[in-house]
Image (cartoon, rainbow, N blue to C red):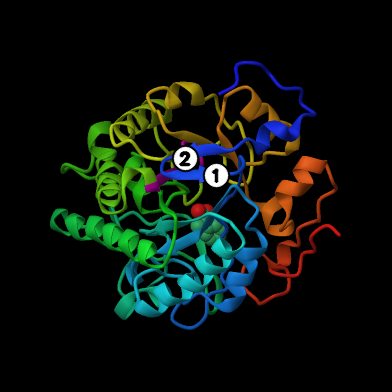
């Protein structure tokens, strides 16, 4: 990392290649994972999804949308999976299209835990969670926007099955041609539910102390890293997000220890959402540098970054890469636009979730 500070107008700092685990990436502009609800029947990725990702292949790294590791891990309609042969074949079209354009693409491995609805669950069963505490949160199902269902608490002897499901999903992602995987430990989903003391009231080895609440995160990352290699494993965390009705009494201590444990695994990267996902970047004080300290891998930051903030984050050494969500959704050639300081297309909120090509593959590139 450069020790000198580049001028804020110098976007070239974002276009220096970087080694992230086993991957050699051409630039520091990542595409953040974005839920778009455009999978086909069986939650299978399509040719349209391949077009969308291939249009964005100039990203230093594409982190593909959150993808359920099992039927039970689904919480919203039309999100893709990585547990059936059809889904693996669908994702192969995506990775081939991205690779044909010289891009790099990671799959985000997702289990929603309690953020689900019985209509999306196998046999209409209750969603699973660390504890039987319903979230004050909504999801979207066939009938529209609804409250999430009451979950049941996972039994201790079910946890090895959950961990193995992540491992199998990582193996499936490798088979589908992904360059790496990202464990979704953020935004109030299953792993985050285990991390926080408001959603985790367990009294066994996975609840109570910080050591116990970080256990599932650690064991999932360990199993995934053993399957695909630590240099092809990343993880996403969101220490301050309230998403999914999540909260913790001491996020600084919790996430400092979480990263310290993950550091021992030699993971490729940690991807941090700073503040409230998609919102306030500083809802309360938090020392991200302290959280990062024990970690040797790449550090990816996200949440409301613009061009100047991204340049500053990389130039100062605060981050190795910056992940852009909404700006990448609306600008397939975002890296070029940042480099040239070109104007950005305006995102259309109405087409974020669900639908077809409109608001998905029809945002224009420059020229
Ligand atoms: C928006 C809508 C549904 C899910 C996340 C996977 O926040 C999501 C998500 C975002 O991580």
The vertical placement of 358 against 164, above or below, is: below
Q: Earlier in the sequence, mark 2 or mark 1?
A: 2
Q: Which residue is mark 1?
A: 25
Q: Residue at x 78, y 47 (%)?
A: 337
Considering the numbered disc 2 on the image, is that residue within a helix, a strand or a loop? Answer: strand
Q: Is residue 352 left or right of residue 22?
A: right
User: Which percent across, then down, holds residue 276?
Assistant: 57, 41
**In the drawing, what numbered circle is on residue 5?**
none
Near mark 2 (Cα within 10 A), the count class, few <14, some 14-19 or many ≥20, is many
Residue 54 quadrant: bottom right
Q: Nearer the viewer, residue 30 or 101?
A: 101
Q: Is residue 250 left or right of residue 13?
A: left
| Residue that label 2 marks | 20
Look at 73% across and 58% down and name the residue there.
330
337 w.r.t. 77: above or below? above
| Residue 146 is at least partly visible in this image | no
């Amino acid at each position: 990392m450069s020790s000198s500070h580049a001028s804020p107008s110098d976007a070239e700092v974002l276009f220096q290649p970087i080694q992230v685990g086993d991957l050699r990436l051409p630039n520091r502009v990542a595409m953040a994972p974005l839920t778009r609800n455009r999978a086909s029947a069986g939650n299978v990725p399509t040719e349209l999804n391949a077009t969308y990702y291939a249009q964005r292949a100039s990203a230093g790294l594409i982190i593909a949308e959150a993808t359920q590791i099992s039927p039970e891990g689904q919480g919203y309609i039309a999100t893709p999976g990585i547990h059936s042969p059809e889904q693996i074949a669908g994702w192969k079209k995506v990775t081939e299209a991205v690779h044909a354009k010289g891009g790099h693409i990671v799959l985000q491995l997702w289990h929603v835990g309690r953020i689900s609805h019985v209509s999306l669950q196998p046999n209409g069963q209750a969603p699973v969670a660390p504890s039987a505490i319903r979230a004050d949160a909504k999801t979207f199902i066939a009938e529209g926007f609804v409250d999430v269902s009451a979950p049941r608490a996972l039994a201790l002897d079910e946890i090895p099955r959950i961990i193995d499901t992540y491992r199998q999903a990582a193996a499936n992602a490798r088979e589908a041609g992904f360059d790496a995987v990202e464990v979704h430990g953020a935004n109030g989903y299953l792993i985050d539910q285990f991390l926080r003391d408001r959603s985790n009231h367990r009294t066994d080895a996975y609840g109570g102390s910080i050591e116990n609440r970080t256990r599932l995160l650690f064991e999932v990352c360990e199993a995934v890293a053993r399957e695909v290699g630590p240099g092809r494993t990343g993880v996403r965390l969101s220490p301050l997000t309230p998403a999914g009705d999540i909260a913790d009494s001491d996020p600084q201590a919790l996430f400092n220890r979480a990263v310290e444990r993950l550091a021992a695994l030699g993971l490729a990267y940690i991807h941090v959402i700073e503040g409230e996902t998609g919102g306030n970047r500083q809802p309360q004080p938090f020392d991200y540098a302290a959280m990062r300290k024990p970690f040797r891998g790449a550090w990816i930051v996200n949440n409301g970054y613009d061009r100047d903030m991204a340049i500053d984050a990389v130039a100062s050494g605060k981050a190795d890469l910056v992940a852009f969500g909404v700006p990448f959704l609306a600008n397939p050639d975002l890296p070029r636009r940042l480099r040239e300081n070109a104007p950005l297309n305006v995102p259309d909120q109405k087409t974020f979730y669900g639908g077809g090509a409109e608001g998905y593959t029809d945002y224009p590139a420059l020229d």
